[in-house]
Image: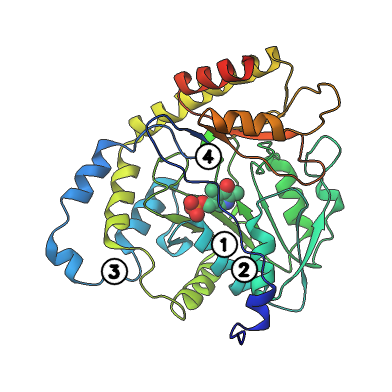
Amino acid sequence: MTNYWTDTVTRLTPYVPGEQRSGDNIIKLNTNENPYPPTPAVMQAVSALTGDQLRLYPDPESVALRKALASYHGLDVSQVFVGNGSDEILALAFLAYFTNDKVLQFPDISYSFYPVYCDLYGIEAKTIALEPDYSINFERYEANAGGIVFPNPNAPTATDVTHDAVRSLLERHTQQVLLVDEAYADFGARSVIDMIDEFPNLLVSHTFSKGRSLAGLRLGVAFGHPRLIEGLQRVKNSFNSYPVDAFAQVAGIASLQDETYYRTVVDTIVKTREQAVSDLHARGFQVLPSKANFLFARVPQQGSEKTATPIVNRLSDAGILVRHWTRPRLDQWLRISLGTPEQMQALMSCLDA
Ligand SMILES: *Cc1c(COP(=O)(O)O)cnc(C)c1O
């Protein structure tokens, strides 16, 4: 039949999210969700919403939530933007700052949504190779050739770059936006939010999905100079004026108010990470140093089988889901989200079997 799609849509290779298989005995270590629930304060805030609050549109500017975020990070509300997950923040940011005639540079091994947005918007992507040890080397990035985006810690490698390295990149790169995707900043990497006053082209994105256990809620945040934030608002108000619903606005505030709970959850995951690294080393895996809630681990090389595919399939048959890419340089590696200590033990037992 006639193809009614535009050429852009016909040519797109959409992002493929990790499998959301559910069931009693499934151990999900494939999408970097938090294995612990959000603070009970979130559930209370959500249940306290009234019918009237749902009858009406939510605050289009999410002022109360943005004020809570501003005060949490010691910023002004004009430096904070919220969206429906940080994926939406990225989508709006790419549109606001990168749909020009310049290239957008990002690591060749990185968050696989970046090339998808480039395709969708017709942005020319220029991928920059990671070093042989999978680290990002900013010397390879051409300053002022166009925008730059990278996750810190990077995904799926889990490694971070230093604050000083980002600073020296910013000192060279002043003419376009540098977007630092800090989806995993909760787990030990140093955030660069403290440089937004100094560098008006720095945008930092955060999410409530990972450290704050709210992936199902869809809440993401951007921090930057008020002029950058205004750019995001212009795009948002030309696309969907109410991206953050009434539930997410109250739940986000409740999450920020329970710092003790948040710290406990993050500390527990960091402890689980240390144990999991040593358990994987003991089984012959190579593991990159992780500052995230997941590990990037290379399967032991056995016989003629070089890729991780057989292990991924055996784990999947046993109900343990991990993430795997079949591209060169990635095909021997697993990205394993950190679950509870019991879930990690089940993974280790399955690997032994
Ligand atoms: C998980 C993730 C996001 C998106 O998170 P949301 O759930 O959309 O807030 C963004 N960037 C990276 C690198 C991620 O891993």
Q: On the image, numbered disc 1 is attached to which residue?
A: 90
| Residue 27 visible here | yes
Amino acid carrying mark 2 in the image? Phe
Residue 51, given in percent of the width and then of the height, sits at: 13, 63
Mark 4 and mark 3: Cα distance apart in space: 30 Å
Q: The residue tagged with tag 2: helix, strand or loop?
A: helix
Badge 4 residue CB within 8 Å of ligand 1: yes
Q: Is residue 251 left or right of residue 36?
A: left
Determine contact: label 4, label 3, CB under 8 Å. Answer: no
Q: Residue furthest top?
A: 282
Mark 2 and mark 3: Cα distance apart in space: 24 Å
Q: On the image, numbered disc 2 is attached to which residue?
A: 94
Residue 11, given in percent of the width and then of the height, sits at: 70, 74
Give the label, 3 or 1, closer to the camera: 1
Q: On the image, numbered disc 4 is attached to which residue?
A: 32
The numbered mark, 4 or 2, whose residue comes first in the sequence reads 4
Q: Residues within 10 Å of mark 3 (few under 14, many from 20)?
A: some
Q: Residues within 10 Å of mark 4 (few under 14, many from 20)?
A: many
The numbered mark, 4 or 3, whose residue comes first in the sequence reads 4
Q: Residue at x 37, y 58 (%)?
A: 66
Determine contact: label 2, label 3, CB under 8 Å. Answer: no
Residue 112, given in percent of the width and then of the height, sits at: 66, 54
What kind of colouring is applied to the model shown?
A: rainbow
